[in-house]
């Protein structure tokens, strides 16, 4: 590896050898001595309170160390966030909520004893039904993507936006679309279940956990338990997938720490089962979205309106910016968006890959296809005609926006021009075939709170430290390449350390912001190192080595430019004429994500996102039984997602355009843009194949018959 090719080279994963040898330690695998085991109790009602607790049979079991309920749980210092503050009251806010736990010598004893705890409830009526005609729809109370998450991203967006006069824009349009799209509740199912091992001593509190950010985990838990953050060490070098469900990893981490408090000095292990994850780790909320579009006879949008209803939880509000992409994608003189939530007796939703954009762009990009057909325009050409010069709302120029190139390049590579636009125009051996397109977008965000340390020794070995997370995406490798580039050395000379609160503070792996934040910080530390070597050591490393630290510098361009990644996704769909079976033999994406740090890991991440988009389009739906208020398909036997046999050819390309303003690397985020638009491309292809417009995800065969 030469110095110059560090960034942009298809470097193998630096953590790959450990992973393939089974030597990468995941949260549940840390070799701890004499662990105790925790098994949670979950509410069997959807709303009400616990009126009586009988733990005698459980406590009588040999090997049981403690039974926790709200009656004896440690009182938390910060109990205002019900996702953090478990067992602080007798209230039950959703079925599956944690109402207790057993700690025992073995996992089997804990689980058995948990079944012996008798809880008596007073039930109140519950309501888990998301409908557009509910009378309790209201504006979200929080502008932030998260409800009450301290220190997290505040995008400052109001819930509603308006410009011009949508009614007039629609009335004056040559063609219009007015359609309602619905998306299902989708549950998080990363490969590695959410797991903690907690050890509480008078000095240090240690938490091995699976998290997207050790520092956020630590600060939330320090606040909850009222202890100095410096006492808590959170460790999470390897994470087996996350997708948003491990950004806010607190319900189970809190419970593990509570358990550890009861058996001081003893490690307490708490792995969630797959079934428990369906109530305790969050999900993408279901939506009902009305989109109205109008275009003039030249195919230029005259009005864009997007009205979203989404579910949130009664116990805590979570409202994502489902309309965010609509406010950015296309130019039109008349625009409006609204967001309304309804608080149901369900677990709290959370971010999931492309939170807001993934569902919102299913609706917008489906409606764009409908309008293109109504106008008799090619869907690629229609989008190109409506490309904005500047951000439609803020008026800021884009730091880089190559969506048109993505559309053109994708169309050429996909063979789009050969397409007969008429629906039902391709029949092959009993299959109806069609193709569709959709655009992708995701903001290039920054999260605050980043620092890095670089140590160099006299033989030119660099140790770079930052408490970042690699959630399986290749971050460890990409940051090593960035450090090598920033330092002007070979990647072999860089040893990167991440995933531990003993390292400098870092923001969480979320909002596709990781490389942007951590890479910028490493760049700053490298500059600091060079400056120190020059000013104090004549440009050479002293015999005893040298260490410097730097914080992430502000990016003044963020106030001057709108920063987003873009993409164009093309899908081929086959639908069986007799059975309605739907298959996706081909997906192709072209992305404008700035400079690509590592084409190998980037390709893997883009393919992964498109696969998850395919999964959202065709398979994933959490089904709530309204009588009991829980997800009935709460395991991998009944919650379907795309497996190998469901995925055909996925091809990804990127433009490799450096963004001049986002960061010193010239990169934009790739982790989420790749899931945004996939579902619409597939739905649009299904329409082209069958003439049936499915506006409800997932697209199952019954909807195509
Ligand atoms: Mo991502 S949904 O911010 O992990």
Image: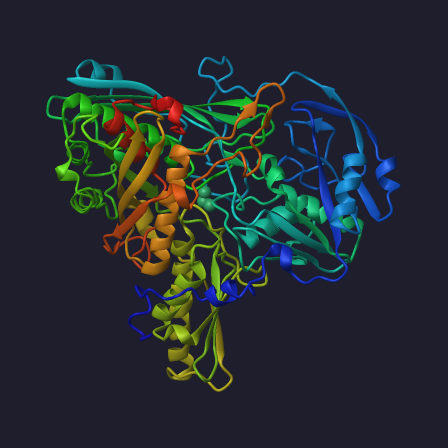
Q: Judge whether residue 295 can be spotted in this image.
A: no
Q: How many marks?
A: 0
Residue 4: quarter of image = bottom left
Residue 537 coordinates in the image, percent (x, y): 42, 83
Quadrant, the C terminus: top left
Residue 520: quarter of image = bottom left
Residue 226 coordinates in the image, percent (x, y): 70, 47
Q: Indicate left or right for 203 with 531 as reference.
A: right
Q: 328 or 436, which is in the foreground?
A: 436
- In this rendering, the answer to whether 336 lies above or below 515 is above
Query: Given the current orientation, which residue lies at the most extreme left position?
Result: 298
The image quadrant in which ligand 1 is located: top left
Quadrant, the N terminus: bottom left
Residue found at x 44% / y 43%: 643
Residue 341 coordinates in the image, percent (x, y): 48, 23
Query: Given the current orientation, which residue lies at the most extreme front position?
Result: 429
Q: Judge whether residue 359 can be spotted in this image.
A: yes
Residue 560 coordinates in the image, percent (x, y): 28, 46
- In this rendering, the answer to whether 8 lies above or below 245 is below
Residue found at x 13% / y 38%: 418
Q: 660 or 558, which is in the foreground?
A: 660
């Amino acid at each position: 590896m030469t110095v110059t090719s560090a960034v942009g080279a298809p470097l193998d994963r630096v953590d790959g050898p450990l992973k393939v040898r089974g030597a990468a330690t995941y949260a549940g695998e840390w070799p701890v001595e004499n662990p105790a085991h925790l098994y949670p109790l979950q509410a069997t009602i959807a709303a009400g309170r616990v009126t009586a607790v009988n733990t005698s049979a459980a406590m009588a079991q040999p090997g049981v160390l403690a039974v926790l309920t709200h009656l004896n749980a440690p009182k938390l210092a910060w109990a205002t966030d019900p996702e953090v503050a478990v067992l602080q009251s007798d209230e039950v806010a959703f079925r599956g909520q944690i109402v207790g736990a057993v700690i025992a010598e073995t996992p089997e004893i804990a689980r058995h004893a948990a079944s012996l705890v008798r809880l008596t409830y007073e039930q109140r009526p519950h309501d888990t039904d998301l409908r557009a005609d509910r009378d309790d729809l209201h504006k979200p109370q929080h502008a932030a993507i998260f409800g009450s998450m301290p220190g997290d991203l505040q995008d400052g967006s109001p819930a509603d936006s308006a410009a011009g006069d949508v009614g007039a824009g629609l009335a004056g349009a040559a063609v219009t679309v007015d359609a309602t799209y619905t998306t299902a509740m989708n549950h998080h199912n990363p490969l590695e279940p959410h797991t903690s091992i907690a050890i509480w001593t008078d000095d240090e509190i240690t938490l091995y956990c699976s998290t997207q950010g050790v520092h956020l985990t630590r600060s939330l838990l320090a606040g909850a338990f009222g202890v100095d953050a410096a006492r808590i060490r959170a460790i999470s070098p390897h994470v087996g997938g996350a997708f948003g469900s491990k950004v806010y990893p607190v319900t189970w981490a809190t419970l593990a720490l509570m358990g550890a408090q009861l058996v001081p000095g003893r490690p307490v292990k708490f792995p969630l089962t797959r079934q428990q994850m369906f109530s305790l780790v969050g999900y993408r909320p279901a939506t009902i979205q009305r989109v109205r579009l109008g275009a003039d006879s030249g195919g230029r949008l005259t009005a864009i309106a997007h009205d979203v209803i989404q579910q949130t939880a009664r116990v805590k509000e979570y409202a994502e910016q489902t309309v965010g992409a609509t406010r950015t994608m296309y130019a039109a003189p008349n625009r409006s968006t609204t967001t309304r939530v309804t608080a149901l007796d369900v677990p709290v939703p959370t971010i999931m890959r492309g939170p807001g954009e993934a569902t919102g762009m299913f609706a917008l990009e489906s409606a764009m296809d409908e309008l293109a057909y109504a106008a008799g325009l090619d869907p690629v050409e229609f989008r190109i005609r409506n490309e904005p010069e500047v951000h439609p709302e803020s008026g800021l120029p884009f730091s880089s926006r190559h969506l048109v190139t993505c559309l053109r390049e994708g169309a050429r590579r996909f063979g789009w021009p050969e397409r007969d636009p008429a629906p039902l125009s391709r029949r092959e051996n009993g299959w109806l075939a069609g193709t569709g397109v959709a655009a992708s977008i995701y903001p290039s965000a920054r999260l605050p709170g980043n620092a890095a340390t670089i140590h160099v020794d006299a033989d030119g070995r660099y140790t770079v430290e930052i408490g970042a997370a690699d959630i399986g995406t290749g971050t460890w490798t990409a940051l090593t390449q960035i450090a090598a580039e920033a330092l002007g050395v070979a990647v072999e000379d860089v040893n990167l350390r991440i995933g531990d609160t003993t390292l400098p503070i870092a923001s969480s792996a979320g909002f596709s912001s990781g490389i942007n934040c951590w890479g910028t910080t490493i760049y700053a530390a490298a500059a600091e190192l060079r400056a120190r070597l020059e000013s104090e050591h004549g440009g050479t490393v002293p015999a005893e080595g040298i260490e410097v630290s730097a914080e992430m510098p502000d990016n003044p361009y963020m106030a001057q430019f709108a920063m987003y990644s873009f993409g164009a996704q093309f899908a081929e769909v086959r639908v069986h004429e007799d059975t309605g079976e739907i298959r996706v033999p081909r997906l192709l994406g072209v992305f404008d994500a700035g400079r690509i740090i590592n084409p190998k890991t980037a390709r893997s991440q883009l393919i992964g996102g498109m696969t998850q988009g395919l999964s959202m389009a065709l398979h994933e739906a959490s089904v709530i039984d309204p009588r009991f208020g829980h997800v009935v398909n709460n395991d991998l036997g009944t919650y379907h997602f795309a497996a190998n046999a469901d995925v055909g050819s996925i091809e990804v390309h990127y433009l490799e355009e450096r963004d001049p303003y986002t960061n010193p690397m010239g990169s934009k985020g790739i982790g989420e843009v790749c899931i945004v638009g996939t579902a619409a491309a597939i739905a649009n292809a299904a329409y082209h194949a069958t003439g049936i417009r499915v506006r409800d995800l997932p697209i199952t065969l019954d909807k195509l018959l």
